[in-house]
């Protein structure tokens, strides 16, 4: 039986210790990555502003309401691209909408996602323009940044509009979209830590 020298044993223990530190480091990195993907908007209050209000259209869109002003951040997404799914909030014309979400405290934001329905067969289009801006006080917002659709809105589909960001710190997030016809949104998510 061969004896292991003290120096060989020390080198082996050192390598084992380094491997253990690497595993622990990867575990911490995984936890940090999960924290960075937390939906900060989940369950948070928001205010919707109609950009060019017309009472006739307000009455029509009451058929697809935002129940108690909570559906856009409740975490409930439409199961399929069907405007009759109660997760959808319908908005009709009137220039578009501003949705200002209060995250409750300042946070570092890495991604914003807003989900829309496209179904031209029933007059529902994905918005031509979706923008996001940020604020620390809810009054003065940054210049808007365009969110991009993840794919073309062909047929009857759910189209997420997304934007990724580096080190944006804000308490308030404003998502704005233009309404040419019906626009249906089911969820707005703000990821970060």
Image (cartoon, grey):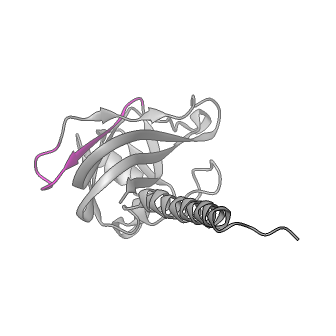
Q: Nearer the viewer, residue 105 or 156?
A: 105
Where is residue 74, by image quadrant? bottom left
Magenta span includes 39: no
Up-down relation of residue 106 to residue 161 (above or below): below
Q: Nearer the viewer, residue 152 or 34?
A: 34
Q: Quadrant of the N terminus?
A: bottom right
Magenta span includes 135: yes
Name the residue at 16% across, 44% down.
141
Up-down relation of residue 128 to residue 166 (above or below): above
**Relative side of 61 to 19, left or right:** left
Asked if one can make out residue 98 in the rendered structure from this viewpoint, the answer is: no
Residue range (magenta): 128-141
**Relative side of 29 to 176, left or right:** right
Residue lying furthest right:
1
Name the residue at 49% across, 58% down.
29
Where is residue 70, by image quadrant? bottom left
Where is residue 40, by image quadrant? bottom left
Up-down relation of residue 6 to residue 170 (above or below): below
Q: Nearer the viewer, residue 166 or 79?
A: 166
Name the residue at 44% across, 47% down.
113
Residue 58 rendering spot, x and y as whole percentages:
32, 51
Residue 35 rendering spot, x and y as whole percentages:
44, 62
Residue 193 rendering spot, x and y as whole percentages:
35, 60
Asked if one can make out residue 43 in the rendered structure from this viewpoint, the answer is: yes
Name the residue at 61% across, 66% down.
10
């Amino acid at each position: 039986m061969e004896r292991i020298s003290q120096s060989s044993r020390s080198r082996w223990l050192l390598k084992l210790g380094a491997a253990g530190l690497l595993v622990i480091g990867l575990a911490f990195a995984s936890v940090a990555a999960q924290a960075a993907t937390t939906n900060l908007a989940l369950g948070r209050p928001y205010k919707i502003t109609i950009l060019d209000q017309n009472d006739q259209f307000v009455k029509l869109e009451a058929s697809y309401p935002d129940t108690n002003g909570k559906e856009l951040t409740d975490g409930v997404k439409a199961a399929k691209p069907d405007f009759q799914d109660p997760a959808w909030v319908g908005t009709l014309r009137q220039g578009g909408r501003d949705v200002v979400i209060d995250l409750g405290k300042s946070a570092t934001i890495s991604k914003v996602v807003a989900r829309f329905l496209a179904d031209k067969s029933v007059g529902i289009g994905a918005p031509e323009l979706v923008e996001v801006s940020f604020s620390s006080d809810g009054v003065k917002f940054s210049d808007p940044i365009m969110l991009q659709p993840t794919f073309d809105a062909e047929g009857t589909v759910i189209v997420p509009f997304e934007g990724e960001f580096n080190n944006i710190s804000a308490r308030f997030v404003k998502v704005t979209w233009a309404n040419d016809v019906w626009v249906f949104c089911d969820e707005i998510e703000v990821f970060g830590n």
